[in-house]
Image (tube, rainbow, N blue to C red):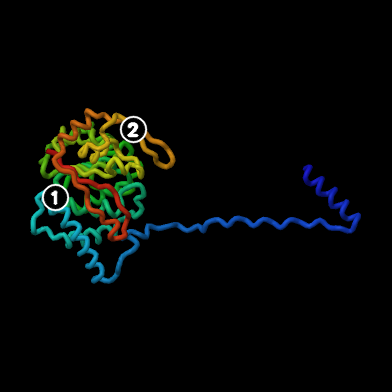
Amino acid sequence: MLKSLLKSITNGTLKLFGLKLVKDKPKRKKESAPAIKMRYVHDPAFSYMNNDLYQEMLYEELAGYAEIFFSNDIIGITDRFNLKDQISEFFNTYTKREHTDNTSGSGFHNAFWLFLFCRAMNPELIIESGVWKGHSTWLFEQASPDAHIFGFDKNLEHVEYQNLKAKLIELDWNHYDLPEFNPQKALVFFDCHVNHAKRIIEANKKGFKHLIFDDNPPVHKLYSHIPGIPTAHMVYSGVGLDSPKISWSWNNKKLTRNIDLEQAQRAQKLIHEHLYFPDVGGPTRYGGFTFLTYVQLK
């Protein structure tokens, strides 16, 4: 109000002398970012070669990475298992999935290895701790259609796949009595961000031998996300278990987690093998990378 009054008085005074108030140039409005919905371009669901020869070149290269991993003979893979054929089938399955946006869940890297590992192992029972949108659950069904699959999550409201055959249970897996199973034909996938030492002890108590952990970085690479602490790598190597507390910064926030050292040591004694799955996100330019790890118990 006062500003308008002063402006009126100033204009009136200037007119007496034949002068005119020069207006300030209007400020240019800041241009907003274009409203473009970014798609997951670095994903086989959106970007891939149409030429069969070039697709075969990619499958051949990926088979080389897979051969290195399975050469450890960790699950008794036979010579009759054709890696390249299985990789081709994975791409045919993955590119046709119903829901392509699995933000905050497993991407290409995880999907590739989970599918291939299940095809190699041929499990009769699959346990998934951490269902999220149901993407991995769906993938397990495609890889092992004859397996009994149980998915556990404390909140199943985010599940997008409506026609899953798996039994989804809104509960922590440790509080559920599973049917009898063959330990050599059973797999547990932990993607629930819970203390890995605790999960290893639980799995051993239930009789499992074959585990896969997501988000399993070594202690010096904790900065990028919030995994279960201690991670399986910390438990296996012992690095990072010199103190009952650990802290790091993430998104400009200092995070601190307590570590039950006695529990971690008990879990460490149960591990027979600890192997990272080779990175295929970088070589293919699909989906970046994760710390997906196979853990075999004694």
Q: Which residue is mark 1?
A: 121
- In the drawing, what numbered circle is on residue 50? none
Q: Quadrant of residue 279?
A: bottom left
Q: Quadrant of residue 58?
A: bottom left
Q: How many marks?
A: 2
Which residue is the extreme one toward the right? 16
**Which quarter of the rendered picture does the C terminus lie within?**
top left
Closer mark to the observer between disc 2 and disc 1: 2
Tell me: residue 38, above or below residue 179: below
Residue at image position (22%, 28%) is 262
Residue at image position (22%, 50%) is 277
- Element type at mark 1: helix
Q: Residues within 10 Å of mark 2 (few under 14, many from 20)?
A: few
Q: Is residue 78 left or right of residue 278?
A: left
Q: Earlier in the sequence, mark 2 or mark 1?
A: 1
Residue at image position (81%, 56%) is 21
Q: Is residue 167 visible?
A: no
Residue type highlighted by circle 2: Arg
Q: Which residue is mark 2?
A: 257
Q: Position of residue 131 (x, y in %)?
A: 29, 43
Residue type highlighted by circle 1: Met
83 or 94, which lies in front?
83
**Which quarter of the rendered picture does the N terminus lie within?**
top right
Mark 2 touches mark 1? (CB < 8 Å): no
Q: Is residue 253 left or right of residue 26?
A: left
Tell me: residue 125, above or below residue 205: below
Q: Is residue 268 visible?
A: yes
Q: Position of residue 197 (x, y in %)?
A: 23, 34
150 or 185, which lies in front?
185
Q: Is residue 185 left or right of residue 115?
A: left
